[in-house]
Amino acid sequence: MESILVLIHADESGATLTKASLETVTAGKELSARLGTQLTIGIVAADASVPANAVANAGAKLLAAQGPAFAQPRFASDAAACEALCRAAQATIVLAPQSSRFARVMAAVAHRLGGVIDTHITALADAESVEASRWFYRQRIEAVVTRTARPWFLLLDAGTHAPFAGESGDAQRESGQAQRELSTAPIETVEIVQVNLPALRTEVTGIRAPKQGEQTIRPDAKLLFVAGAGWTKKQPDGHVHTGEAAKLILEFLRVSSASLGSSKSLVDQGGEGNSVLPFLTHLNQVGQTGSTPRHAKGLSACCHGEEPHVVGWRFIAERRAISLDPNCGWTRGKADVVYIADAFQVMAKLNESLAAKS
Ligand SMILES: Cc1cc2nc3c(=O)[nH]c(=O)nc-3n(C[C@H](O)[C@H](O)[C@H](O)COP(=O)(O)OP(=O)(O)OC[C@H]3O[C@@H](n4cnc5c(N)ncnc54)[C@H](O)[C@@H]3O)c2cc1C
């Protein structure tokens, strides 16, 4: 009989679980229901009470590694916390979000427990045994992995499951000594697991991040807006209008809260000393040699829609594009709706109407 543990963590505020954590709870609930087995949720947080409340109605046994050491991500403390939670749960299958915090430690935790790990999992199924799906070769080949080795750690990609949204419960904390009573403890009760912390040599003294307004990559946004090289090309009046392009794009991001993607041609221009959009980096690049984001909708403007770019749109559910070229890749079956129009004019109108609405 499998024993399933879902490991989750709070966000930087410490008060809320990350969306990816809640998605992993959904995956764990679905898998344990299908296998007819007990689900355990292990929380890593400075104070587990608020995160525990968010999952109190998940029908799972709740464990927590809590204390000031777990307020911020750090390899030594996070690895020790996850190891202690896995041992307390005696898990055979461990699901965790593929967040930077957990991705950094989970291979080491699997090693400490003599287990195995697979990353970037997008789906879980069970036939004769548990099956995990992931994509290879830039999302072109999907593989289904099964393993007999246990414990089996699976890091789940964000955006692959609906976030768990059960009503908050009223989870109560128990002391570590209650471990013996675990099997009879009420399901809403959180058991605090003792963690043997090694010497901590790293201290997080602060976070340096771009100002909110400058942050253009927003993985949780509903819409992905992709800018193509056309924004920096000569327009019908014989001139480039990069400044105007920058204003239109940033204004659209502000009013729509969309995430910003780019074609490779556009971000590559920065290296050639050409006129470019200063807020774009290679991190924005979508495609075969860029990222494969997951958003409900995507809008591309001034991009040709070539295959190496569009392969990065594989997980975008609804695709629209604005291009001057009626023969662009988007019109050849790559987008659901294509507007053959001047993106400068379309985006100016769109910004106007969105600003009026807000
Ligand atoms: C091995 C390999 C890997 C690659 N990986 C990637 C990748 O990861 N990501 C990626 O993006 N590319 C990748 N490429 C490059 C890709 O093939 C294309 O060259 C690139 O995507 C083209 O970018 P673009 O469409 O923005 O530019 P262009 O091809 O220059 O297209 C610009 C478009 O803008 C339109 N336009 C111009 N002005 C306007 C206007 N006012 N209104 C509306 N439309 C306008 C034009 O009609 C044109 O269709 C890769 C290529 C190779 C060989």
Image (cartoon, rainbow, N blue to C red):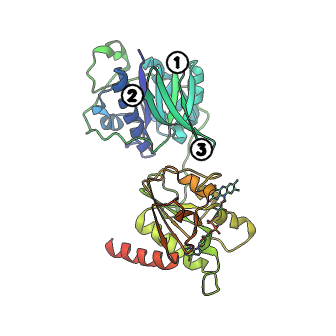
Q: Residue furthest right?
A: 272
Q: Secondary structure at mark 3?
A: loop
Label 3, ligand 1: CB separation under 8 Å: no
Residue 307, image quadrant: bottom right
Could you say where residue 303 lies in the image, as x and y percent from the top left? 58, 67
Label 2 element class: helix
What number is the disc on residue 86? none
Q: Quarter holding the N terminus? A: top left
Quarter assignment of residue 145:
top right
Outermost residue to the bottom: 237
20 to 58, vertically: above or below: below
Residue 176 appears left or right of 188: right
Q: Which mark is residue 31?
A: 2
> What residue is at 42 percent from the left and 46 percent from the top?
13
Earlier along the polypeptide chain: callout 2 or callout 3?
2
Query: Circle 3 sits on which residue?
Result: 140
Q: Give the CA distance from mark 2 to mark 3.
A: 26 Å
Residue at 25% from the left image edge and 39% from the top image edge? 167
Q: Tell me the residue that label 1 is attached to.
A: 150
**Alpha carbons under labels 2 and 1: distance apart:** 16 Å
Q: Toward the viewer: 87 or 73?
A: 87
User: The C terminus lies in which quarter of the figure?
Assistant: bottom left
Residue 199 drawn above or below residue 347: above
- Quarter of the image where one finds residue 262: bottom right
- Please state which of residues 328 and 254 is positioned toward the viewer in this rendering: 328
Per the image, label 1 sits on a secondary structure element best described as loop
